[in-house]
Amino acid sequence: MKEVACLLVLFSNLIVNPGGAQMKFVEDPAKGTLTLLDGPTPVLTYCFGDQLKEGADAKFTRSGYIHPLFSLDGRPLTADFPADHVHHHGLFWGWPLVRTRGQTTSNWESRSPSLRPYLVGWLKRGEEAGLAALSVENVWKLDEREVVAKEIATLRVHPAEPSGRAIDLELLITAVGGPLELQGTTVENKGYGGLCFRSAPLLKAAEMTTDRGRLKADAVNRKFRWADISTADLGVAVFAAPDHPAAPLAWLVRNSYAGVINPCWPGLKPVTLAPGLPVELRYRIYVHRGDAAAGKVAEAFELYTSPKKR
């Protein structure tokens, strides 16, 4: 009973009121998840504890990603451990090629030696300048033992507006104890890696739109400023900050087997992080009603990149 009481106090302390809308964080310690609610409607769930699909090999255990990401009416927009790509996890970030301590590994998919994030602790859970804010520190461990990087992930969730909701994501990655080299996949020169949105089945074969117009087929290694996947009812867009390293980025955008949006960084050319010198990667996820036009995605991107952005 004492533990239950403590949890109830924790939940009440996490209630925030950005923009007049009541939001609160609700933690499920048993599941290793933290969910942000806007009133009764879920906005997103951050998976801080180990997650593993029933029946899957333990080598696929993952943590430190967002799933589900929800539509404005509470429908799950992301897939986790999908059968076609079991290493896809909602809205996640990782690299197919990571070189450290003289070894090549990956935190994009399962590989030996293993590399994945482990929770250190929460830096913030509450209100910040009228937004719901979450900041968490993780470390990347090589073979579950040696820390090779520190990661700080920060989310700032804006109140919902009639056409959509903006969610800002900031990643701060710092090499620890030695250099850390990150690279996108070299398979067929695709270059994918970094932030990736993997959609739920409801967005399979959905319309793909970018700042260069509508796509008629999957795009691989093409430079965009933003990309959107949507149906007539709902959609998700990803914006890369104008000051993102190597901007404008080459993107992977596809709906051939599922909706996937990946602003690839660093792509085919590796980037080496020196110990103690962090790299900052910033994005905005825009969850909207209707297709890209109805959801005013282009206008939302201009607002994001404007010097007077909200």
Image (tube, rainbow, N blue to C red):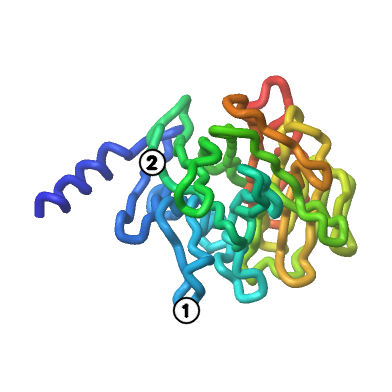
Q: CA distance from mark 2 to mark 1?
A: 38 Å
Q: Residue 169, position in %: x, y?
A: 58, 39
Q: Residue 218, position in %: x, y?
A: 85, 62
Residue situated in front as seen by the camera: 14 or 91:
91
Farthest residue to the left: give it: 1
Residue 109 shown left or right of residue 33 in the figure: right
Residue 251 shown left or right of residue 99 in the figure: right
Q: Which residue is mark 2?
A: 22
Q: Amino acid at mark 2?
A: Gln
The C terminus: image quadrant: top right
Q: Which residue occupies 32% across, 55% down?
A: 28
Viewer can see residue 195: no
Residue situated in front as seen by the camera: 108 or 236:
108
Q: Which residue is mark 1?
A: 55
Compared to residue 221, the image places residue 137 above or below, namely above
Which of the labelled discs sits on residue 20, or is there none?
A: none
- Helix, strand or loop at label 1? It is loop
